[in-house]
Amino acid sequence: MSTSTETTGNGTRSAVITGASSGIGAATARQLAAAGYRVVLGARRVDRLTALAEETGGVAVPLDVTDPESVESFVREVPECNVLINNAGGAKGLATVANADEDDWRWMWETNVLGTLRLTKALLPKLVESGDGHVVTITSVAALEAYDNGSGYTSAKHAQAALHRTLRGEHLGEPVRFTELAPGMVETEFSEVRFKGDTEKASKVYQGLTPLSADDVADVITFAVTRPSHVNLDQIVLKPRDQHSATRAHRS
Ligand code: NAP
């Protein structure tokens, strides 16, 4: 199989993964490290990152994507970058627009939208300079559909996706690829965060069906990233077999 992971004259390819302390980010770090990438891991829970850095031979760097100063000091630790995985994100709460909680909205927009903007802006010059860059942004089926009680998250994911898709045109002709990955249900800490630590409520989300695992998503990310550099997977929608849409699933 032809891949783009071979080292060039400049050494091993490096991949920055935001939100690497858990779920999809941590699984992606493991799989990209196994595929030969030097992984740079960013998140707020540094203890988890440090353990994962030891396991993968990568580097753990504290990162809060909602804080411009934290992003600046993170980027200072990234001399070269071939791949950026914009993964840090999530949802807070489920409420109608009429009952919207502004703090939850702020959290979702700051993390998913402005976080993606900050990291992408900061690392694009290095990605282009690498001669073979790749930005993978983890959006969601919530970036494709609007559903009741989900407007804070669906609006943030739509905005994050619009930002990402715009880059494809703005950088056409430059040596950088853009892939949007929109997953459906993945069993991670996502629902625990959405329901603010209510694990019982969180586990009900996945009852009666087999959701995707973080590794299922990481497999697809790794596939996209390791295609030859002229091959751009623009948009990938990935759902469990039992999930039809954001709001319709078969449960036994
Ligand atoms: P997760 O297990 O909760 O992981 C979220 C990651 O984001 C954690 O590593 C967390 O790290 C990081 N993060 C949150 N706020 C951050 C901040 N301010 N700065 C830096 N890192 C931050 O959930 P996941 O399912 O793997 O989510 C990964 C991505 O997939 C998210 O963008 C999510 O919206 C998307 N997604 C998930 C699903 C799903 O069903 N699970 C479906 C579609 C899309 P720290 O808390 O340590 O900072």
Image (spheres, rainbow, N blue to C red):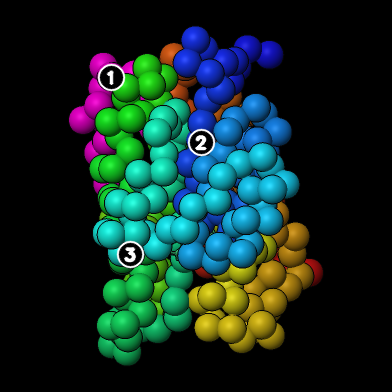
The residue tagged with tag 3: helix, strand or loop?
Answer: loop
Q: Is disc 3 in contact with disc 1, using a CB cutoff of under 8 Å?
A: no
Please give the name of the residue rendered at 47% of the width and 16% of the height, measured from the top-left corner: 10
Tell me which label, 2 or 1, sits earlier in the chain. Answer: 2
Q: Is 16 positioned to the left or the right of 174 in the image?
A: right
| Segment tinted magenta in the rendering | 163-178
User: In the rendered image, is residue 86 in sight?
Assistant: yes
- Ligand 1 within 8 Å of disc 3? The answer is yes
Which residue occupies the foreground of this view, 116 or 181? Answer: 116
Q: Is 251 positioned to the left or the right of 173 in the image?
A: right
Q: Is 133 positioned to the left or the right of 245 in the image?
A: left
Q: Does the magenta stretch include residue 177?
A: yes
Mark 2–mark 3 Cα distance, whole angstroms, equals 20 Å
Q: Is disc 2 in contact with disc 3, using a CB cutoff of under 8 Å?
A: no
Q: Which image quadrant: the C terminus?
A: bottom right
Bin the neighbour count of mark 2 within 10 Å (Cα to Cα): few under 14, some 14-19, many 20 and up: many
Q: Which image quadrant: the N terminus?
A: top right
Q: Name the residue under label 2.
A: 15
The residue tagged with tag 1: helix, strand or loop?
Answer: loop
The residue tagged with tag 2: helix, strand or loop?
Answer: strand
Q: Name the residue under label 3.
A: 66
Which residue occupies the foreground of this view, 178 or 16? Answer: 16
Position in image of residue 45 (x %, y %): 55, 66
* Amino acid residing under circle 3: Thr
Q: Is residue 234 magenta?
A: no
Mark 2–mark 1 Cα distance, whole angstroms, equals 19 Å
Position in image of residue 107 (x %, y %): 35, 73
Bin the neighbour count of mark 3 within 10 Å (Cα to Cα): few under 14, some 14-19, many 20 and up: some
Q: Name the residue under label 1.
A: 174
- Ligand 1 within 8 Å of disc 1? The answer is no
Please give the name of the residue rendered at 59% of the width and 15% of the height, measured from the top-left corner: 6
User: Image height check: is 39 above or below 49?
Assistant: above
